[in-house]
Amino acid sequence: MPDLSWTNLGFNPVETNSIIVSRFKDGVWSEPQSVNSVEFSINFFAGSLHYASSCFEGLKAFRGADGKVRIFRPEENADRMTRSADFLAMPSPSKAMFLEMVARAVKENIEFLPPYGFNASMYIRPLIFGSSPQLGVATPAEVTFAVMVSPVGAYVGKTLVPVSAVLVRNYDRAAPNGSGSYKISANYAPSLRPYKIAHEQGFGEILFLDSSTHSCIDEFGSSNFIGIKDGVYVTPLSSSILPSITNKSLRTIAEDLGIKVERRPVSVEELQDFQEVGACGTAVVITPIHSITDKPALESEELTRTYSFGEKDKCGHVLHRMYDVIRGIQDGTEEDIHNWCMIL
Ligand code: PLP
Ligand code: COI
């Protein structure tokens, strides 16, 4: 049994028993192998290191109140990974192979799955990357698919404790006809510098705007944007944001709860109309946002305006209710009426 404190996990990699790996070469995927080390050897000329030929996924496994192990919507992640790999002109595993390797990664590391009741889960990170040597910009000849897992707690701060965010006006995440809607590694590089600056200034999250007009909200660096306006669930419709599986699930839950859903462009000015704002995603689940600061530039000491939402230290009641339902489905304490969980 690993010597882990389930209460203070945060979002950091923990070395587990195994990583499940398959390699694509000469048109076929190799038989998946369990690799017992987080270290591996790679050619310095590997395409992914130079030209970002890599994409990944994020999903979670939960230990339920009934002792069962549930993986939340893995088929959605399999489909999205194929979409990302297609965008990079790279091969992806079949859905059956993806699901099999994900299940095997959880089973082989089952003692790292946090018990029920600790606001913790097992994060599953499937990764596809170009692993063969190359110098020209081209699709890699050989590709590696790995599924790793790590026990995790809250992504930022503490579960359901609101955090602050800052609008990023002078850095863009994704171009209108670019790669923003794919879960490719290259999308995260443009957020590294803004994250560093924002964290140094004490902000917990960064919020990107649409890069063509900077007038509408795109998404947070790690997650989608949700606002609650007079009881309505509002979330941006944009071609440059990641189609979040959490957001899709929450929209369905909202409808089940009789909450109206609007998925449409959301202007920056509309921030003043929201009573609750949240970041949603696999890692962040629903993280309440208590304020969004607007500045002419991230580095600027000048503030244009700060928008505030609800109480500074408390999640608003609509987002809290939705959090309870999605976490209840994942923990087996709410009925899984849409059949979202794969039970191991
Ligand atoms: N947006 C970005 C940029 C993300 O990295 C993620 C995380 O995967 C999300 C949104 C949320 O997507 P999901 O709910 O599928 O995890
Ligand atoms: C996830 O939520 O699964 C992600 O991949 C987000 C990432 C920033 C940790």
Image (tube, rainbow, N blue to C red):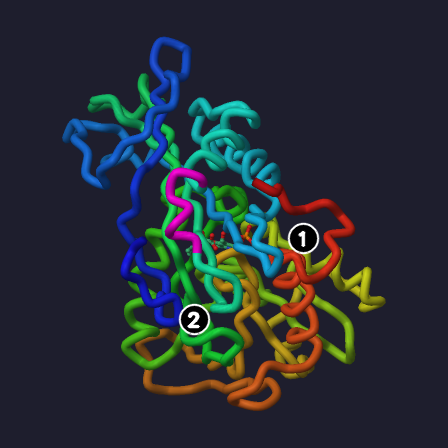
For image coordinates 50% across by 87% down, the residue present is: 305
Please, which residue is most extreme toward the top here?
26
Identify the disc placed on residue 203.
Answer: none
For image coordinates 29% across by 26% down, the residue present is: 137
For image coordinates 56% across by 27% down, the residue present is: 95
Q: Earlier in the sequence, mark 1 or mark 2?
A: 2
Q: Position of residue 84 (x, y in %)?
A: 49, 35
Residue 88: within the magenta? Answer: no
Q: Report the amino acid beneath label 2.
A: Glu
Residue in the foreground of this view, choosing between 278 and 293: 278
Q: Report the amino acid beneath label 1.
A: Lys
For image coordinates 61% across by 50% down, the residue present is: 245
Range of the magenta residues? Answer: 107-113
Main secondary-structure element of the magenta-colored stretch: helix
Is residue 274 visible in the rendered structure shown here?
A: yes
Disc 1/disc 2 C-alpha distance (Å) = 21 Å
Q: Position of residue 164 (x, y in %)?
A: 46, 80
Q: Nearer the viewer, mark 1 or mark 2?
A: 1
Image vertical order of residue 266 relative to residue 175, above or below: below
Q: Position of residue 201 (x, y in %)?
A: 31, 80
Image vertical order of residue 111 relative to residue 157, above or below: above
Residue in the foreground of this view, choosing between 303 and 53: 53
Please, which residue is most extreme toward the right here?
258
Q: Classify mark 1 as within 8 Å of ligand 1 or not, answering yes or no.
A: yes
Is residue 218 visible in the rendered structure shown here?
A: no
**Residue pointed to by mark 2:** 205
- Quadrant hosting residue 342: top right
**Residue pointed to by mark 1:** 248
Q: Secondary structure at mark 1?
A: helix
